[in-house]
Amino acid sequence: MPARKTAGVAGDGGLGSLGAFSVRPLTPETWGDLEELFGLPGGSMVRSCWCMAYRRTGKPPGLGGPPGSMAAANKRAMCDLVGSRVVPGLIGSREEYLKLRRSPVMKPVDDTPVWSVVCSYVAKPYRGRGLQHRLLAAALEYARQNGARVLEAYPVDKADRSHDDFMSFGSRSLYERAGFREVVRRSPTRLVMRRELGSAELASPER
């Protein structure tokens, strides 16, 4: 679910105010927004992955080919997924992310049906403005409206600060502020957190 570009975001080079903020599902109609978002500064990792890394297991398509082959294959795969009217984005049912099953850190905790927040991305010009909090709040509401009852995340938890480009999993504090609690830790710097969803009003995004 890419952040929708409005007058306060697009065209000001990151120097002006953010203006209005809204979130839309990724569909064929909004595919161009995703391409524009990933093309902004700070997007080198997402331009390689195209949000496909955790949707597959085994050897990724394009591996070992000419430079850019894997990125191009990932982009095609995501575009095909969107074209099939699957709505990928910030969150989804855990079963959609095949790689989670084999991860020593993110493998299933139990048999509880969960939706997973695997990662999120904010372009470099707009970091430090609370957008991850807003994206997470939107994800919570989207999951609740679509029948999810438990949301799961896999944030980083360490004393020293990582470079922003490597914080796609989010920080522990990000999820704690949104009402998540730790359920298991399988790594000194990574953990699994969950939040139960109900009909009650969800936490407000950071302003």
Image (spheres, grey):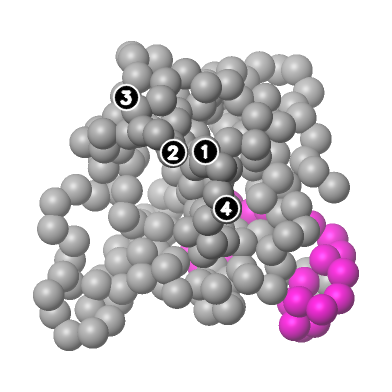
Please name the residue that numbered disc 4 is placed on: 161
Please name the residue that numbered disc 1 is placed on: 157
Q: Position of residue 30 (x, y in %)?
A: 57, 65
Please name the residue that numbered disc 2 is placed on: 189
- Kindly report the distance in space between the C-alpha atoms of the residues bearing marks 1 and 3: 19 Å
- Kindly report the distance in space between the C-alpha atoms of the residues bearing marks 1 and 2: 5 Å
Q: Earlier in the sequence, mark 4 or mark 2?
A: 4
Crowd tier of the residue under label 1, counting other residues whose Cα lies within 10 Å: few below 14, some 14–19, many 20 or above: some
Question: Quick one: 98 or 84, which is closer to the camera?
Answer: 98
- Callout 1, which amino acid? Asp
Magenta stretch, main secondary structure class: loop
Question: Quick one: 159 or 66, which is closer to the camera?
Answer: 159
**In terms of secondary structure, where does tag 3 sit?**
loop
Q: Position of residue 81 (x, y in %)?
A: 35, 57
- Callout 2, which amino acid? Thr
- Callout 3, which amino acid? Pro
Q: What residue sits 69% from the left and 63% below the top? A: 127
Q: What residue sits 17% from the left and 85% below the top? A: 66
- Kindly report the distance in space between the C-alpha atoms of the residues bearing marks 2 and 3: 18 Å
- Kindly report the distance in space between the C-alpha atoms of the residues bearing marks 4 and 1: 9 Å
- Callout 4, which amino acid? Arg
Please name the residue that numbered disc 3 is placed on: 108
Residue 134 visible in image? yes
Q: Is residue 109 above or below residue 21?
A: above
Task: Name the disc covering residue 190, or none.
Answer: none
* Residue 14 sits inside the magenta stretch: yes
Stretch of the chain drawn in magenta = 9-32
Q: Position of residue 190 (x, y in %)?
A: 43, 36
- Kindly report the distance in space between the C-alpha atoms of the residues bearing marks 4 and 3: 27 Å
Q: What residue sits 64% from the left and 54% below the top? A: 24
- Kindly report the distance in space between the C-alpha atoms of the residues bearing marks 4 and 2: 11 Å
